Image (cartoon, rainbow, N blue to C red):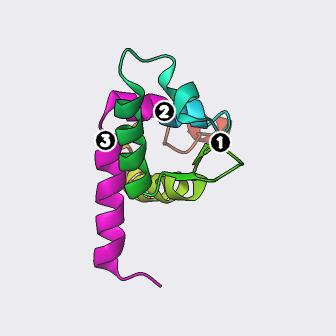
Amino acid sequence: MMDGGAAEERLDRAFAALADPVRRAIIARLSRGPATVNELAEPFQISKQAVSKHIQVLEHADLVTRTRDAQRRPVHLNPGRLEAMTAWIDRYRLVHEQQFRRLDALLGDPKNAAPSTATEEQT
C-alpha cells in the first residue's frame, strides 16, 4: 500500500498534467481508444515532438501508458488513475453536498420539509 505522501504526489502530478489543454485533449482522444503519436498530433498545430513531450508528462503522471506493437507504439489511457482522481474529487463533493443539505434544512427549504398531511392542515 502506498503511503499518503506518495499518493498526494501522484495526485499532484496528475492534476498538474491535466492543467494543459493539449494534454486534456489527448486524454479525451484516448478515451475513445489507443492511438499513436502521429494520430494524436493530427488535430494540433504543434510538432509531433511537442506532442511526444506532452505524452511524456502524461506518462509521468501515470495517466497514460505505451505498448509496443511491432513498429507501432500506441498510447493507452490509464483509466485507473482517472478513477483515483474522480474518487478524490467525489470525496470532497459529497462532504459539501451534505453541508448544503444541512444548511437547506436549517433555512427551512420547502423541498426538504416533511410533507404535510390533510389532517395537519385542517387543525
Front tag of 1 and 2: 1
Q: Secondary structure at mark 3?
A: loop
46 and 31: which is toward the camera: 46
Residue bearing the label numbered 3:
107
Q: Secondary structure at mark 2?
A: helix
Q: Residue at x 65, y 42 (%)?
A: 72
Quadrant for residue 11, please give it: bottom left
Dot 2 or dot 3, earlier in sequence: 2
Mark 2 and 3 residues: CB-CB less than 8 Å, in contact? no
Give how far across and how far down residue 50 sits, in percent.
34, 31
Q: Secondary structure at mark 1?
A: loop
Mark 1 and 2 residues: CB-CB less than 8 Å, in contact? no
In the image, which residues are magenta?
A: 1-26
Q: Is residue 44 left or right of residue 37?
A: left
Q: Residue at x 50, y 57 (%)?
A: 81
Dot 1 or dot 2, earlier in sequence: 2
The extreme front residue here reads 71
Give how far across and how far down residue 53 sits, in percent.
35, 40
Residue bearing the label numbered 1:
72
Label ID, residue 85: none
| Amino acid residing under circle 3 | Leu
Q: Is residue 51 left or right of residue 72?
A: left
Residue bearing the label numbered 2:
26
How far apart marks 2 and 3 lie (CA) works out to: 45 Å
Q: Residue at x 50, y 37 (%)?
A: 27
What is the crowding at mark 2: few (fewer than 14 residues within 10 Å), some, or many (at least 20)? many
